[in-house]
Image: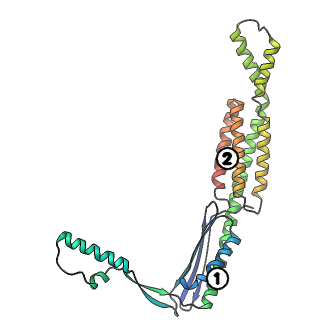
Amino acid sequence: MIKSMTGFGRRQSTWLDGTVTIEVRSVNHRFLETSIRLPKSMGNLEESFKKAIQEHCARGRVDLTVLLQGGRGGTRSVQLDAVLAKQYHQALRTLQRTLKLGGSIDIGLIAGFRDIVALSDQPADDPKLAKLVEKLGLQALQDLAKMRKKEGALLANDILGRIDTLRGLKGQVAGRAPAIGQETFHRMKARVEKLIGGEIPDLPRLHQELAVYADRCDITEELVRLDAHMIQFQHTVHSTESVGKTLDFLLQEMGREVNTVGSKANDATITASVVQMKAELERIREQIQNVE
């Protein structure tokens, strides 16, 4: 059964006197795109997380974030943004000259800007902590995969229900189709007789031309192809592979057949059914945008 590209997974555990939290989110994307945020001391886990994401997801943008809060065994470091400090200093000197202000621009003033000097916690490079993070990450990915599968089942039910509606509308069109050729023939014949206003000189030739014209209104082939596309579409929905692009292609082909039916039939009853069919196709298209 198809899977959704939208999902969420979260796992949390204690570590010493702190906590380790892993969050994984996924949204729609044409291809598979990953973003992994790890503490610097755990950069070696990035590649294994990428491979794990590729095992669970074929399409979508997947964001994995590792959050470490509290805990002993870490180090605290001071982060200094010297470039920003110079920009502050230059801006203050410009302001001083512009407003002709007195006073001095010293270290105490510059250090008062909170984004110049910052204190950060760096987790300890502990193999046990790294192993815990990897374990929680894989569990969060499994939760994400389960959610994508569950939402995919809901999408499949909705899509298949709309295909059934589409098949019912197609049946209404097919029931009306046989009468279109005959009606078109008699309508055009009456129009020609009215224009001539007298006896038709070559009646067999007229009937032949009208029959050719009426045959152009035949929509049997389009209805057969539409039915074939719907059957293939239903089979594809039940596939366990990544089928979002295939479903989108089949939907385009179904839309093309429906448009052709509407333009060839030139019938008010069929046109009304075609409008409803287009509406259902558009609703299906919205759902397919979220299919992996």
> In the rendered image, which quarter contains the C terminus?
bottom right
Residue at the disc numbered 1: 134
Can residue 227 be seen from the camera position used here?
A: yes
Residue at the disc numbered 2: 281
Nearest to the eye among marks 2 and 1: give it.
Answer: 1
Residue 224 in the image: state x and y as whole percent: 80, 40
> In the rendered image, which quarter contains the N terminus?
bottom right
Look at 67% across and 46% down and name the residue there. 281
Residue 160 in the image: state x and y as whole percent: 73, 53
Look at 60% across and 88% down and name the residue there. 129
Instruction: Indicate the quadrant where residue 139 lies.
Output: bottom right
Amino acid residing under circle 1:
Glu
Q: Secondary structure at mark 2?
A: helix
In the image, 113 versus 3, the foreground residue is 113
**Left or right position of 76 against 116:** right
Look at 79% across and 55% down and name the residue there. 235
Residue 141 in the image: state x and y as whole percent: 66, 74
Amino acid residing under circle 2:
Leu
Q: Say the numbered circle drawn on residue 197.
A: none
Q: Secondary structure at mark 1?
A: helix
Instruction: Indicate the quadrant where residue 223 lies.
Output: top right
Look at 70% across and 42% down and name the residue there. 256
Residue 180 in the image: state x and y as whole percent: 76, 27
**Left or right position of 269 against 68:** right
Query: From the viewer's perspective, is residue 3 above or below residue 280?
Result: below
**Left or right position of 266 against 36:** right
